[in-house]
Amino acid sequence: MNTQQKLEQSICSVIRGQDELIRKALCCLAAGGHLLLEDYPGTGKTTLAKALAQSISGAEFQRIQFTPDLLPSDILGVSILDARTSEFNFRKGPIFSNILLADEINRASPRTQSALLEVMAEEQATVEGETYQFDDLFFVIATQNPVEFRGTYPLPEAQMDRFAMQCSLGYISNAEEVSVLTDQQLGVHPIKQLTSKVSLEEIMLWRKEVAEVAVSDELKDYIVRLVSATRGLPEVKLAASPRASLALMKISQAMSYMLGSDFVTPDVIQSCAVDVIAHRLVLDADAKYAGKTARNLVAKILTEVEVPA
């Protein structure tokens, strides 16, 4: 089995009935992006992140539980005075890791949420004037509750743009839920029996192979036309940026690789477009009141933009 298959099999042994979501999460990892999961509590968002981290040997996993009183220094780290030497020593925060779970990210203030911006975009953190470079593998899985929940803050537009994909898990089928209850009766959660399947080196090699998946000039033009179509919609107050075009190309390469192809096709781009583009759009108030959603608008764009022959 290749790296993707090992990871997929490992995570599916813990999370039931979410095969499609697991593939999307792995696509995000392979493409070098970050993943935002929005769904109701108890659907397996946190378990997915833990299972992924435990499946990679040598990967450092950290979890940040976002709360209204969380400060940027709680994420990035803080300098502490050493009484013996009278010098300040920097103590790194949980963001210095390979796989970071930002749990319920929209329960913290926008000021605290923005502490992740530089790291997610440039894989470096500047603290007190000093820049710290991150390891090659840095993958953020952020979870958020639906924005209408009490005690939540909408994520800043700049941060939404840093996530390559936004997905939802949804509820599993009744049969899968029965199997979850059966596992629970055994007395041991499946994630506690999970062992690492791949190494960090294998993950980095996997990423290089994904980056080599061919994308024709016609399909690059198609990707740009899809993204730029959001900029002419009257319902959209803030459209998708060129970062969305780049993310859509990389995610399409990763999805093509997972499907066993060494080149991207229009069908793959279309299957990824909504998850990659929609969360970056900000609709005006009239569109929201009319019941329109960003995901529906992107789906409509896919039917209107001409597909390369």
Image (spheres, rainbow, N blue to C red):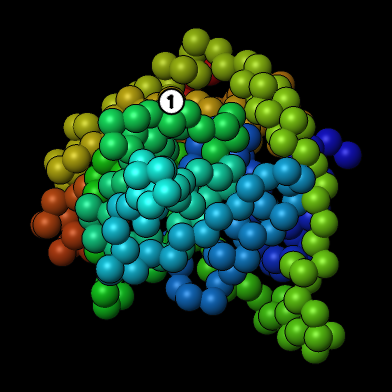
Q: Quadrant of residue 159?
A: top left
What residue does disc 1 label? 246
Q: Which residue occupies the foreground of this view, 164 or 130?
A: 130
Say what amino acid the circle numbered 1 marks.
Answer: Leu
User: Is 114 positioned to the left or the right of 136 in the image?
Assistant: left
Q: Which residue occupies the foreground of this view, 32 or 148?
A: 32
User: Is 127 positioned to the left or the right of 35 in the image?
Assistant: left
Outermost residue to the bottom: 185
For image coordinates 13% across by 51% down, the residue present is 284
Characterize the local packing of mark 1: few (<14), some (14-19) or many (20 or more) Cα atoms within 10 angstroms: some
SS of the residue at dot 1? helix
Query: In the displayed structure, would residue 107 be above or below residue 282?
Result: below
User: Is 290 positioned to the left or the right of 199 in the image?
Assistant: left
Outermost residue to the front: 84
For image coordinates 25% across by 45% down, the residue present is 157
For image coordinates 17% across by 55% down, the residue present is 287
Q: Which residue occupies the foreground of this view, 294 or 267?
A: 294
**Whole-percent x, y for residue 29 in the image:** 60, 40
Q: Which residue occupies the foreground of this view, 93 or 303?
A: 93
**Whole-percent x, y for residue 248 in the image:** 47, 31
Q: From where the camera sits, is residue 21 visible?
A: no
Q: From where the camera sits, is residue 203 visible?
A: yes
Outermost residue to the right: 1
**Whole-percent x, y for residue 186 in the image:** 84, 85
Q: Quadrant of residue 138?
A: top right
**Whole-percent x, y for residue 269 in the image:** 52, 32
Image quarter hosting the N terminus: top right
For image coordinates 73% across by 43% down, the residue present is 58
Outermost residue to the top: 217
Q: How many marks?
A: 1
